[in-house]
Image (cartoon, grey):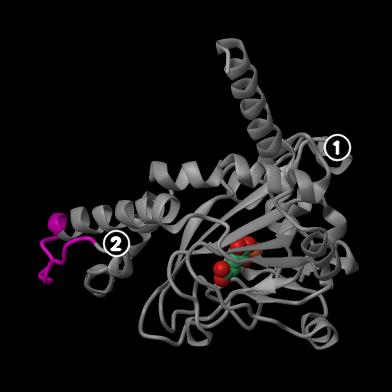
Amino acid sequence: MTMYGKLVIASRIFYLNNFNNNFMALLTSNQLQKFNEDGFLLIKGFYDVKKEIEPIHFGIWKIIQILLDKYKIDVERKAFSSATFDHGYKELIVHNRKYGGDLYDAVKQIPAFLRLVSMASNEKLFSEIRNTDFPGIAGAGYGIRIDNPNEEKFRSLWHYEYRDQLRSVDGVVFWSPLGSVKPETGPVQICPKSHKGGLRRSFLRDPENPDKTGAYAMRIENESGLIYQYGVTAPLCEPGDLILMDFLTLHSSGKNVSDRSRWSMQFRYFNFNDPSGIKINWTGCVMNGVQLKDVHPELVIEN
Ligand SMILES: O=C(O)CCC(=O)C(=O)O
Ligand SMILES: [Fe+2]
């Protein structure tokens, strides 16, 4: 074959590869239909555990080592392994629960985590779901939850994401575990099809949970009636899996009754093109110091 012939073939392969990258759908039509119908979708193995999840485990492990050193906590040290990436964390918070809060603030700044949050495949997935060419990432809307066994204070009560994040009504929550999520780990609880009920009102305060504050304290109107109406599902998942939730889908934290903390990543994509977002200048909510009642007074019941 001539040099010219080889060049033509190489450029065709390059074009086809890029064509595939840009135009091959990440979701099957079945998955898309399921998401639209149920308001959530579990995608098995969406992320590459070795390449994309392990570097996050490693970052968390390193920060824990630094804090164990800083506070001179006497715990046997273990070399890094993905399976035991949080070794020493239990001892850290037994020493002082506040150190857990410091770690929580720190881990969301691990570059490998931010790389995962802004992966092109997330953007593409969101574009496919919302049929948009302009996804956004909710600022201050990404983090790594650490749900400790039998701890009630930070558990999220029933909510839909738009209420707490705003940005745009057609947003999607990306939820992905850093450890195996079994029934006893307290999987995220979801009311299938509840997104079809649209925006719902919430009580500002929760007399049943006086220790919860701000958004943690809000309670959806007719919460128990809605749970009964839609039922609850709690998908089990493994590192690398991804759970997508519509911004209108009712969901809450499960109860972790295992002996290990539940580590999970969450971030949110919204649609810059959505008129609902343009109307409110894509403002954030709680995490940006904005009160829901100032943006949507009609969704708040003062009690
Ligand atoms: O993981 C949880 O317990 C709750 C998660 C949640 O509310 C979210 O990711 O938006
Ligand atoms: Fe949520």
Q: Report, in whole angstroms, how far the alpha carbon at label 2 lies from the one at label 1.
A: 40 Å
Considering only order in the chain, which callout, 1 or 2, is on the residue closer to the N terminus?
2
> How many numbered discs, if any?
2
In this rendering, the answer to whether 31 lies above or below 257 is above
**Left or right, 278 with reference to 113:** right
Query: Is residue 111 or residue 105 the one in the foreground?
Result: 111
Residue in the picture at 89% in, 67% down = 196
Read off the magenta span: 69-80
What's the amino acid at mark 1? Lys
- Residue 249 seen from this side: yes
Q: Which mark is residue 99?
A: 2
Which SS type dominates the magenta stretch?
A: loop
How many residues crowd around disc 1 within 10 Å: few (fewer than 14), some, or many (20 or more)? few
Residue in the picture at 39% in, 55% down = 50
Residue, disc 1: 279
Q: Quadrant of the N terminus?
A: top right
Rendering coords of residue 186 (x, y %): 53, 81
Query: Is residue 235 or residue 149 the one in the foreground?
Result: 235
What's the amino acid at mark 2? Tyr
Beta carbon of the mark 2 residue lies under 8 A of ligand 1 = no
Query: Regarding ligand 1, which quadrant of the image does it lie in?
Result: bottom right
Mark 1, secondary structure of its residue: helix
Residue in the picture at 63% in, 77% down = 235
In this rendering, the answer to whether 100 lies above or below 187 is above
Q: Quadrant of the C terminus?
A: bottom right
